[in-house]
Image (cartoon, grey):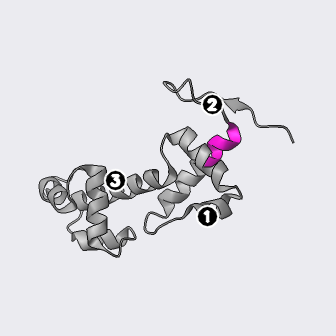
Amino acid sequence: MHAPHPVSAPAGHSSAPALSSFQLQLAQDAAQYLQEHLHRHVTIAELCRQFSVSPTHLKQAFKGVFQLPVYTYAKQQKMYAAARRLRTEHCSVSEVAAAYGYDNPSKFAAAFRQVMGVTPKAYQQTSFHPDHPSE
């Protein structure tokens, strides 16, 4: 078995260290896993077990590829998915919160506002148009 080939950092990040093909694949696989499990809280420990890597290796690879920590990326993806649901379906904020693993609608609303810049209710009221679906 040979060592992975280094891959250049993304454009605009020339000071970032080169990533190996293994690191790129690890970050992409972890991101896919997070996408498939948006309905619950996925821990770093779970990702490390899933991909047989150390927390440090996972975090470095993920940040090297996405320029975000794992948890920030996961929260953003949940909130983007929640926003799509609030925009396209007629359901309550509590239902959407529960669908993305939030038992507490207030915590969901705080996370949503942090990512989207508005509360879920305000987003829903300005974005939901049943006669003209956005997608």
Disc 1 element: helix
Count of numbered marks: 3
Amino acid found under the numbered disc labelled 2? Pro
Residue depicted at x 48% and y 57%: 35
Q: Residues within 10 Å of mark 1 (few under 14, many from 20)?
A: few
- Nearer to us: label 1 or label 3: 1
Which callout, 1 or 2, points at the residue further toward the start of the chain?
Answer: 2
Magenta span includes 8: no
Pick the residue in front: 36 or 54: 54
Please determine whether, in this image, residue 78 is positioned above or below residue 1.
Answer: below
Q: Quadrant of residue 65?
A: top right
Q: Check disc 1 and report the residue beneath it.
A: 45
Residue depicted at x 21% and y 71%: 92
Between the residue at mark 2 and the residue at mark 3, the CA separation in whole angstroms equals 29 Å
Is residue 58 found left or right of 108 in the rendered image?
right
Q: Residues within 10 Å of mark 2 (few under 14, many from 20)?
A: few
Residue 135 makes an appearance in the image: no
Picture coordinates of residue 22, whole percent (x, y):
70, 43
Residue 124 makes an appearance in the image: yes
Amino acid found under the numbered disc labelled 3? Tyr
Amino acid found under the numbered disc labelled 1? Ala
Which callout, 2 or 3, points at the residue further toward the start of the chain?
Answer: 2
Q: Which mark is residue 17?
A: 2
Name the residue furthest right.
Answer: 1
Q: Check disc 3 and report the residue beneath it.
A: 80
Residue depicted at x 12% and y 59%: 125
